[in-house]
Image (cartoon, grey):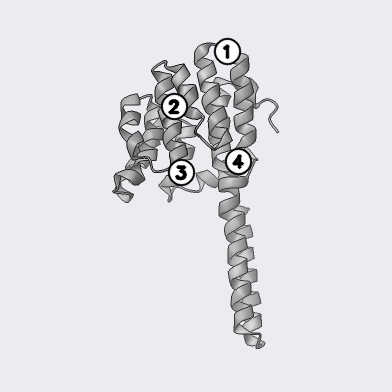
Amino acid sequence: MRFRWQVTFYVAVFLLVLFMSINGYSKILTIGIGMGAALIAFIIHYFYPLALEKRMDRVESFLRDQKNTPELYIHYVLANRLENESRMVLEQIMSKHKREKAQAVYKAAYGVYRKDMNDVRKAVPYIRFSDYRAYYETILLSEDEKCTQARECLKSIKKRWMRSALLAEIEIKAGHRETAIKHAREAINASRGVHRYVLHKEYERKLPEAIASVS
């Protein structure tokens, strides 16, 4: 259904541009409409499910279709704990991106998935974006049972869903389940797209109460 809709959309755009060209419309106007249609298609089919969608079935469908884009497909593989595919997808990313800084965040995510904090520790110094670096630094502190330091570390993170997700993990470790559920709900409600999907799948296993009534 989705593929059929895409084909119909692009055929319609092609016919419109062809009609405008044949009938002497301004080249600038014709090119502008073509580029505008391409932008709309990009937003609908790529950017919206990636970053804005709240419906998990739509995000899951989008991620399943990204096998040729390992940087995106790895989110689906890790969220669903597809052990046989996870290492293969990571290797695809490593062979595609040779620089340590480009690999780091994927190595850290895979390390957390495998519960191999040594791999996470090695990757953290190379993570380029401060929020993601602080996110994994907080996880390391939490795993080392340095909860006070972990709480301080996460304060530097600007993304609300990250802060709330980390607080949920800290409260789980502390045995405060109700507080963990509260923070988990905050994390889901503050997230969209792929990040929301990953959190949702994680809480299905850890805190099913947290996803029972999210908006």
Label 4 vs label 1, nearer the camera = 1
Q: Residue at x 32, y 42 (%)?
A: 91
Measured Cα–Cα span from mark 2 to mark 3: 25 Å
Q: Secondary structure at mark 1?
A: loop
The kind of residue tagged 3 is: Tyr
Residue position marked by numbered label 2 in the rendering:
138
Q: Secondary structure at mark 4?
A: loop
Q: Earlier in the sequence, mark 4 or mark 1?
A: 1
Residue position marked by numbered label 3 in the rendering:
73
Label 3 vs label 4, nearer the camera = 4
Measured Cα–Cα span from mark 4 to mark 1: 26 Å
The kind of residue tagged 1 is: His
Q: Earlier in the sequence, mark 4 or mark 2?
A: 2
Residue lying furthest bottom in this view?
Answer: 24
Sort mark 2 into few (<14), some (14-19) or many (20+) by Cα contacts within 10 Å: many
Label 4 vs label 2, nearer the camera = 2
Give residue 205's position: percent from left, percent from top: 54, 23
Residue 108 position by quadrant? top left
Give residue 105's position: percent from left, percent from top: 39, 39
Residue 21 position by quadrant? bottom right
The kind of residue tagged 2 is: Thr
Residue 201 shows in this picture: no
Residue position marked by numbered label 4 in the rendering:
192
Q: Is disc 2 in contact with disc 1, using a CB cutoff of under 8 Å? A: no
Quadrant into which the C terminus falls: top right
Give the mark count.
4
Q: Residue at x 57, y 52 (%)?
A: 47
Q: Earlier in the sequence, mark 2 or mark 1?
A: 2
